Amino acid sequence: MNTARGHRDERDEHSERQELARLLPPPPHPEMAPEPLKEFLLNEIDLHHRAPVPARAARRWPRLLVVTAIATAAAVAVVVSTQGGGTPTQTAPPATAASVQLLDRVAQAAYTQPQTQARDSQYSYVKTVGHSTSLSEATGGGMQRATTTENLEQWVAVDGTRPGLQRGTAGEKQIPAPGGGSLDSPTYKLLAALPTDPEALLKQIYADADLNHGTGSGSTTGPDQEAFTTIGDLLRRSVAPPEVSAALYRAAGQIPGVTTVDDAVDATGRHGIAVARTHNDERSEWIFDKQTLRLLGERTVLLKDGPWGKAGDEVTSVAVVARGLVDAPGLTPNGS
């Protein structure tokens, strides 16, 4: 055993935990009411007994009194995974201890959000604002970089049986009924049927990612990045039951290469802390409010100079400004 290497790894993990503790406030729900707390703990115990993983310790409790064992064990669980078959690959280091801890706290905050009973007759509503970057050939040769505003409101039928509505910078249009939906085009009903066990959920997401981005597909994205992107899209563009959102966050903590960013800014200028993953010199960031741990938005940042811009430039940035369930297309959660 390389004792010196082991000591360095322990110091690195300790430093990560100290840095995350400095950046984040105390847990947002220290005084959880008895019944929600009981339900949360029973759910955690149930998950642990239904899907045991030998390398993992017991899950953390709401106040995160124990953080080291779960963060380290989650990282080990990723390292021993094999490529293909709906599991993470070994193409990147395991998620950092700090990112696992942050995602666990975000999951707890998501889990304790009010549970809304969705009716099939309702619609999921999400409003986002942001911008993206495009390249075009400039007069006289060379490439020209342009930034496009992309503000969007979207209504999707809870059960997918009726057309929806999309209203954005380019105008308003009806969108086809998604039917049963898919991970790329989800309905509330599809999301509600997803596993709430993080391991089972991640396996399903990887199975989908492997179809177009796995070995032999010719894709340069790869299943790990595709899984991270899929989870980010589901969390940003949809309305999901709290227990499913919590499972998605915990599943993301098992994807190799996930890290944290101390300070990130969403498309509306709100600052937060982020979990991130780097691919092809671009870093995808999910930005969370440091106090409430609510998802603020997502952005992609360049890490090297290139045709798309200079290191530090944003390629895309999207902020979530409203979401909820409504009774008809055109309505918003505040009743307008």
Image (tube, rainbow, N blue to C red):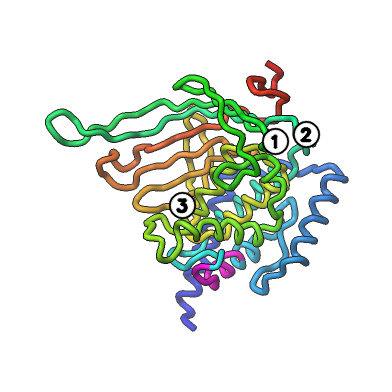
Identify the mark nearer the N-term, 3 or 1.
Answer: 1
Q: Is residue 163 above or below residue 224?
A: above
Q: Is residue 103 left or right of residue 5?
A: right
| Label 2: how many Cα within 10 Å (few below 14, some 14–19, many 20+) | some
Check contact, mark 1 vs mark 2: CB within 8 A. Answer: yes
In the image, residue 62 lies at what x, y percent? 74, 51
> Which element carries disc 2, helix, strand or loop?
loop
From the viewer's side, name the closer residue of 243 and 28. 243
Q: Residue at x 44, y 22 (%)?
A: 170
> Which element carries disc 3, helix, strand or loop?
strand
Q: Nearer the viewer, mark 3 or mark 1?
A: 1
Q: Is residue 25 above or below residue 257?
A: above
Q: Residue at x 56, y 25 (%)?
A: 174
Identify the mark nearer the N-term, 1 or 2.
Answer: 2
From the viewer's side, name the closer residue of 90 and 12. 90
* Distance from Cα at disc 3 to Cα at disc 2: 36 Å
Magenta stretch holds residue 75: yes
Check contact, mark 3 vs mark 2: CB within 8 A. Answer: no
> Which element carries disc 1, helix, strand or loop?
loop
Q: Which residues are magenta?
A: 74-84
